[in-house]
């Protein structure tokens, strides 16, 4: 990773700090990652994510892209700790918050496969203290499956204000148990979707009760250690504060700064929102899922059980929300199914998104509280998926890299309307993309060389449009381009 200049930043983050870009580090090259289309795509990932970080004043971003058993790209940009000037890396720890629910759900399903739990078991069968008031006592039982699908009718939270600033004080396990009788269900069971941290917390309690171990001990022994996820913790590792653990920062304020937030621990809510992990560990987690679904067997979980978890088990009557067993299941680009989960906790936003058919996973992690990590993960997929398809179909090696004579035009140019324009190699030719952009793949402008330092825009129908003319200094370096009489100086 390129050096990020040291600067004095005390207290809240300054705008200038965010605009000093740190570049992403790539995964080790392999036969797939060396293909010209993959190299183009990962270069665009570098530049796009770093621009999003800089212009949105995000302290740091880290991420990874997986294709089956290959980490196609990994990288990080910015500071995990502004005050200590600690640069982020793919091995930086972030709170993954609700992605924790996947590990809890896998643990429940392990116990189900051992015939220790049934999905239709009433929650009260395993938790004798489950005494929440039933607003609709005539409805069916609140079941284990209802917890995993968020169809239990339970309220969203335990009876404590743990999402409230400035302290974000989470309750202990005993406090949750003691307060449960004061709460009331929101809906009849199996009627509506209601996302519930309380529900997945109770699922974790079932894991502990049925296994006879603490929740954390069970997950470490039966999920994390067998999968080799040595950098995934079922509770925020306080011992890593000021070291590998990224500092969490609040949302951007009106003056453009972010406040530093205290490190939180979710205590009794840990099964729903307590974990910390790294981009590389979440990439390995995705690799395991692709491996298990591809080869079958019983690596940590039965392959058919994982398939069961990633199928839709509950559809809200509005048809706007579909959920598996722990997994979010959605339809996305090209009617493809995506599974995974997002995480949103004080100071952090993260996303794990997987497309099982193509065996592509994207991981986006940040230590900014208002970052749309889901949009970042989607953008990463839109960039990498077509490139992977092209590379896999290029057995004859017909797809070529950019002509070296065109490399002089690559770089960053000022854009008076959008921030900057990046000239990139794309599909073997030269292209321009405006940054920042929510969906960069949809705004790529292809250029075709038509003369000395002169290009024309290629329309979507293949016809040629306006001229882009580049100026070159006496040293041979491109200094600016002109299009429609407007000039854009080169800035990097």
Image (cartoon, rainbow, N blue to C red):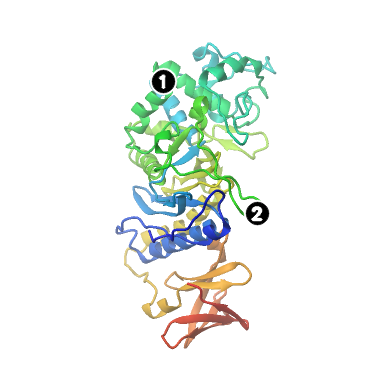
Q: In this view, does 110 lie above or below 394?
A: above
Q: In this view, does 279 lie to the left or right of 195?
A: left
- Helix, strand or loop at label 1? It is loop
Q: In this view, does 310 lie above or below 142?
A: below
Please tell me the numbered disc located at residue 30: none
The spot of residue 478 in percent (x, y) is: 46, 81
Which badge, 1 or 2, comes first in the chain's sequence? 1
Closer-to-camera residue (320/421): 421
The spot of residue 120 in percent (x, y) is: 52, 19
- According to the picture, the residue beneath numbered tag 1 turns out to be 214
Query: How many other residues sit within 10 Å of disc 1, few (<14), some (14-19) or many (≥20)?
Result: few
How many marks are shown on the rendered structure?
2
Residue 316 quadrant: top right
Residue 199 quadrant: top right
Can see residue 301? no
Q: In this view, does 85 lie above or below 261?
A: below
Structural distance between the alpha carbons of marks 1 and 2: 45 Å
Residue 297 quadrant: top left
Residue at coordinates 41% horizontally, 76% vertically from top-left? 407
Question: In the picture, which quadrant includes the N terminus?
Answer: bottom left
The spot of residue 265 in percent (x, y) is: 50, 31
Tags 1 and 2 touching, CB below 8 Å? no
The spot of residue 30 in percent (x, y) is: 30, 57
Q: Nearer the viewer, mark 1 or mark 2?
A: 2
Please tell me the numbered disc located at residue 255: 2
Residue at coordinates 38% horizontally, 77% vertically from top-left? 403
- Helix, strand or loop at label 2? It is loop
Query: How many other residues sit within 10 Å of disc 2, few (<14), some (14-19) or many (≥20)?
Result: few
Q: In this view, does 442 lie above or below 361?
A: below
Can see residue 401? yes
């Amino acid at each position: 990773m390129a050096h990020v200049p040291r600067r004095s930043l005390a207290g809240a983050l300054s705008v200038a700090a965010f605009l000093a870009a740190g570049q992403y580090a790539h995964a080790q090259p392999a036969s797939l990652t060396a293909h010209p289309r993959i190299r183009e795509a990962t270069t665009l990932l570098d530049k796009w994510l770093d621009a999003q970080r800089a212009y949105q004043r995000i302290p740091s971003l880290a991420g990874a892209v997986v294709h089956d058993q290959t980490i196609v790209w990994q990288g990080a940009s910015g500071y995990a700790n502004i005050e200590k000037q600690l640069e982020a890396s793919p091995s930086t720890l972030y709170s993954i918050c609700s992605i924790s629910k996947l590990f809890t759900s896998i643990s429940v399903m392990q116990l189900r496969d051992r015939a220790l739990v049934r999905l239709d078991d009433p929650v009260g069968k395993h938790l004798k203290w489950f005494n929440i008031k039933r607003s609709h006592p005539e409805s069916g039982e609140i079941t284990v499956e209802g917890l995993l699908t968020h169809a239990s009718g339970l309220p969203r939270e335990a009876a404590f204000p743990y999402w409230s600033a400035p302290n974000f004080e989470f309750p202990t396990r005993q406090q949750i148990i003691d307060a449960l009788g004061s709460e009331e269900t929101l809906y009849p069971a199996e009627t509506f979707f209601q996302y519930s941290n309380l529900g997945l917390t109770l699922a974790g309690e079932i894991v502990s009760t049925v296994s006879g171990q603490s929740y954390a001990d069970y997950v470490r022994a039966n999920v994390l250690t067998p999968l080799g996820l040595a950098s995934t913790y079922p509770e925020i590792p306080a011992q890593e504060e000021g070291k590998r653990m990224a500092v969490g920062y609040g949302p951007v304020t009106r003056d453009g700064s972010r406040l530093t937030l205290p490190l939180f621990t979710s205590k009794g809510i840990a099964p729903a929102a307590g974990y910390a992990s790294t981009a590389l560990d979440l990439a390995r987690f995705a690799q395991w899922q692709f491996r298990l679904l591809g080869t079958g067997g019983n690596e940590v979980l039965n392959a058919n059980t994982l398939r069961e978890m990633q199928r839709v088990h509950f559809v809200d009557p509005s048809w706007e929300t579909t959920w598996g067993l722990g997994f979010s299941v959605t339809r996305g680009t090209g009617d493809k199914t995506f599974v995974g989960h997002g995480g949103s906790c004080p100071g952090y936003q993260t996303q794990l998104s997987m497309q099982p058919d193509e065996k592509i996973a994207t991981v986006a992690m940040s230590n900014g509280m208002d970052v749309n990590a889901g949009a970042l993960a989607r953008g990463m997929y839109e960039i990498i998926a077509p490139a992977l398809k092209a590379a896999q179909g290029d057995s004859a090696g017909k797809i070529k890299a950019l002509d070296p004579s065109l490399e002089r035009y690559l770089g960053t140019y000022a854009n008076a309307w959008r921030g900057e324009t990046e000239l990139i190699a794309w599909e073997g030719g030269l292209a321009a993309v405006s940054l920042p952009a929510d969906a960069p793949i949809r705004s790529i402008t292809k250029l075709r060389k038509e003369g000395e330092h002169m290009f024309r825009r290629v329309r979507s129908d293949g016809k040629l449009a306006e001229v882009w003319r580049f100026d070159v200094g006496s040293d041979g370096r491109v200094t600016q381009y002109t299009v429609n009489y407007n000039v854009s100086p080169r800035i990097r």
